[in-house]
Image (cartoon, rainbow, N blue to C red):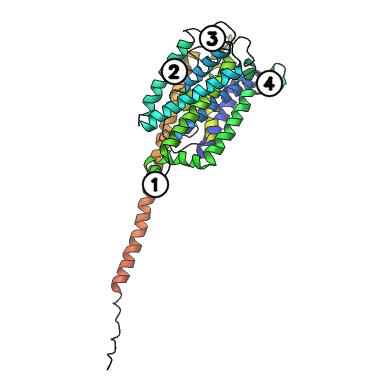
Amino acid sequence: MRRELGMTIALIVMCLALYISNPDFLGQSNSINTLRQISMLGIFAIGIGFVIITGGIDLSIGSVIGLTGVLIAKLSSSQVGGLGFSLWIGIPVALGVAMLIGLGQGLLITRLKLQPFIVTLGGMLLLRGVSQTIAEGGTLSLGGSPLLGLANGGLLKVGNDALVPYPFLMFVAVIGAATYALHFTVFGRYVYAIGGNRDAAEYSGINVKRVEASTYVISAGLGGVAGICYASYIGQMSQQVGVAYEMYAIAAAVLGGCSLRGGEGTVLGIIIGSAVMRVLDNGINMFQLPYEDADGVQRIWRLDPNWTFIIIGSVILVAVILDQIVHMVQERRRIRRASAGAAQAGPSLRAAAAVGAAEPPAVRAPERENV
């Protein structure tokens, strides 16, 4: 919980600094939009968290999100390029395709023993190409589809804004299901065991291949759920939707305490990491500093939006470096404790051996002979 507590404090400090620099940061519209963005990122970041805890990686999640939205727009849109089917057909088909993608990648990794990085990297490029082919290099508009009310609608409306957007409710449902599965079931213990020591998990009787493949299905499935949210939020889909989303998800998971070595991480940590990533992204646009120029004119200095990927990339590097440092420190502590325990046990063993050597051997009484 130390990592989660530290990230929570960092998140609070970040929010206070942004509010002081620009009070509009906590304005109604910006707060609701930030909550919506955190929710949509958190949904698929939790999915990729399952994969990372097993020691794997999923670079295709962004392309899964984009393909899900493109399929929904293609099947359900009544605009040019759409087939005009019902959303009751488009959404299940898109989700089914997403889960099949996860299953296919999981089987390639577990049955053929291919590297997760290579499989999901190839999947990322392949799926993006499929999206581009379906959209014919352009965009597919959802027009006036009822799906658009998913991202913009919600509960407790004040004016034109819903204080509790529907993506947040979906995020809460995902949090509940993921927390139960990861922290309160045998499956969750198996996930941690595989990430901690794959060979030991296999020798203990865990079906490593099945559990590991299941995590890729979970990741792709939650990517599909996030794709529905993004399709409703953007309103038009192309192959560009979902680009670099996997980096945000990996960063959120790592910031939240998921080790890229596997075996570590919590749902709570991923939630906090998702919040940090989206507040950071929003803060790049909201942060401002008033100052006076040489002529005494009041001006406002803002961060350059072109720095977005520089800042986010730096955050990812810092998170990985800190994770490595923490593991190095923990390893050194374990070695010191083991050495101290051996040093304390040494004199005791030598004393016991000396006492045993000083004691004379027991003399048995001679047996009487029968006359």
Q: Which residue is mark 3?
A: 140
Q: Is residue 291 in view from this perspective?
A: no
Which amino acid, mark 1?
Answer: Arg
Q: Which residue is mark 2?
A: 127
Mark 3 to mark 1: distance in Å? 56 Å
Which amino acid, mark 3?
Answer: Leu
Relative to residue 371, is residue 152 drawn left or right?
right
Q: Are marks 4 and 1 in contact (CB under 8 Å)?
A: no
Residue at 49% across, 17% down: 67
Mark 4 to mark 3: distance in Å? 27 Å
First in sequence: mark 3 vs mark 1: 3
First in sequence: mark 4 vs mark 1: 4
**SS at mark 2?**
helix
Q: Which residue is mark 4?
A: 162
First in sequence: mark 2 vs mark 3: 2
Front label number (1 vs 2): 2
Front label number (3 vs 1): 3
First in sequence: mark 4 vs mark 3: 3
Front label number (4 vs 3): 3
The vertical placement of 68 against 342, above or below, is: above
Q: Which residue is mark 1?
A: 334
Label 2 crowding class (10 Å Cα cut-off): few <14, some 14-19, many 20+? many
Mark 4 to mark 2: distance in Å? 34 Å
Q: Image quadrant of residue 111?
A: top left
